[in-house]
Image: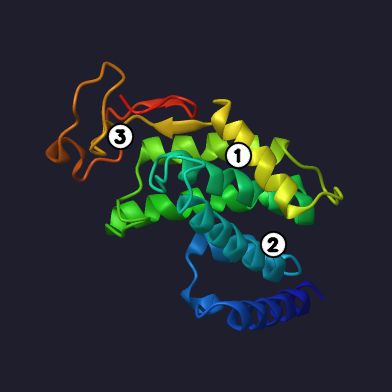
Amino acid sequence: MKKWFFLISIFFVTVSFSQTVPKKFSQLSCPIKTWVIFHPFKAKRAQLISVEANRVSDSIKKTNLLDGDASGGQVDAFRHAYWMARLNQELGKCAAKSLGKAHERENEKQFKKRKLEDGILPDKSSKEMDLFNNNIGLSLTSKREKISKNAIIYRVTNAVLEGKMKIIKKDKKGNFLTCENSLITASELKGKWENNKCLIPSSQTIE
């Protein structure tokens, strides 16, 4: 019985994902595949919400509401928190949180394979930032809460501006800084999972 359920789940998920994005199940990373296998009937909604989160974040990036930085800045923090808030609303906290963790495991594999995420390699600092912001997003909604997407955008944006989330410290040119305001050179970051990037409250401005 379990074997048949497993096979049916794989078929359902493969069809669901192929209808929403170009990637098929076989092209997904191992961490995401594992999540899908254990959440076969939530996979399609999760994918739609993921696409929605990227779309909303891209729109926010084009405004002056946040800092416009989608790689370690306020927009990045917004995207992760909004994604989790919507997943929690639609799928529940456990499924949402485990998908967020699967995404970060995927990033670690990307680092080892030297694949880019948002134009730069993911690293330990970005993972810590994302997981922190994911948890804030989860706290902003509850399962089946009757609240509009615009209201969630308002909650998430306020949380970013109030400094409840984390971003990576940079200078005005977009260079990474240590917590002591020292410039981190590209050579210091190249090929290193752990580095001296500094996480700061999302309300802090660029120095």
Left or right side of 2 for 178: left
The residue at the point 78 percent across, 52 percent down is 148
Q: Upstream in the sequence, badge 2 or badge 3?
A: 2
| Residue 95 appears in the picture as rendered | no
- Of marks 1 and 2, the one in the foreground: 1
Mark 2–mark 3 distance (CA, rounded to whole Å): 31 Å
**Residue identified by numbered label 3:** 194
Alpha carbons under labels 1 and 3: distance apart: 29 Å
Q: Is residue 157 above or below residue 84?
A: above
Do residues under tags 1 and 2 come within 8 Å of each other at their CB atoms?
no
Q: CA distance from mark 1 to mark 2?
A: 32 Å
Q: Amino acid at mark 1?
A: Thr
Note whether 196 is above or below 12 in the view shown.
Answer: above
Residue 31 in sight in this render: yes
C-beta proximity under 8 Å, tags 1 and 3: no
Q: Earlier in the sequence, mark 1 or mark 3?
A: 1
Comes first in the chain, label 1 or label 2: 2
Task: Please tell me how crowded label 1 is: few (under 14), some (14-19), or many (20+) other residues with Cα within 10 Å.
Answer: many
